Image (tube, helix red, strand yellow):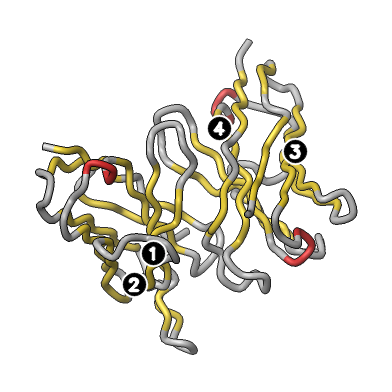
Amino acid sequence: DIVMTQSPDSLAVSLGERATINCKSSQSVLYNSNNKNYLAWYQQKPGQPPKVLIYWASTRESGVPDRFSGSGSGTDFTLTISSLQAEDMAVYYCQQYYDTPYTFGQGTKLEIK
Amino acid sequence: QVRLVESGGGLVKPGGSLRLSCAPSGFRFSDYYMSWIRQAPGKGLEWVSYLSNTGRTTSYADSVKGRFTISRDNAKNSLYLQMNSLRAEDTAVYYCARHFDASGSYSLFDNWGQGTLVTVSS
């Protein structure tokens, strides 16, 4: 199984500041035949299901604000929120869809400082 | 507008069975791969199982293999998860989720239901 490890487990950031969440996979999720990283990021607010933010490691889902961006390749990935808003308080998960079982990181709880 | 509504959760004793249902709307259900994903209280996300659009291809997490069965009825627009030999560690909110693309090649989940809570306890 591909193990996804996020860091940090929790993060407190001031409004308007940058937030950075890291995700590391135990093996590469880069599919060589199409040069795509099979890595997605989700946001989950309390009492709600997860919502996809980013896929292919860096493609923003339709309707997601452009303050959210994804980067990385192979085994190391980053989700960046460029200017934190109050509504961004949530738990963020990375997920690999390279192979079954599809696996998620343990989650990073983002709080407002 | 895509909508997924789960039902069938509840309290069940260890060793018991439960059948979850998911009612999709707002898209052509028969075109899409679907998955069940669960979240234990206060914990992270665990993918449980997927089923191809035709119902011919399935996959399960090792933790549920041999105990859970995913199925669908495209004519009735319904997805199911039959859960047998339930254990305390199966306690979770169970979400049904649509795969991103109709081909099933890209198994990220672009639409989720609100979930149904399964509690396994004596």
Q: Is mark 2 on a helix, strand or loop?
A: loop
**4 vs 2, front mark:** 2
In the image, farthest residue toward the bottom: A33
The residue identified by callout 4 is: B93
Name the quadrant containing residue B51. Answer: bottom right
- Disc 4 versus disc 3: distance between alpha carbons? 13 Å
**1 vs 4, front mark:** 1
> Where is residue B102 shown, x and y percent of the image?
67, 70
In the rendered structure, find residue A54 and report the number of the disc placed on it: 1
Instruction: Have a look at marks 4 and 2 and say if they share a chain.
Output: no
Name the quadrant containing residue A71. Answer: bottom left
| B36 with respect to A62 (left or right) | right
Q: Mark 3 lies on which chain?
A: B
Residue at image point 47% right, 87% down: A34
The residue identified by callout 3 is: B21
> Where is residue B8 shown, x and y percent of the image?
73, 29
The residue identified by callout 2 is: A58
| A108 with respect to A59 (left or right) | left
- Disc 1 versus disc 4: distance between alpha carbons? 24 Å
Q: Which chain carries label 2?
A: A
Quadrant holding the N terminus of chain B? bottom right
> Where is residue A90 shown, x and y percent of the image?
31, 41
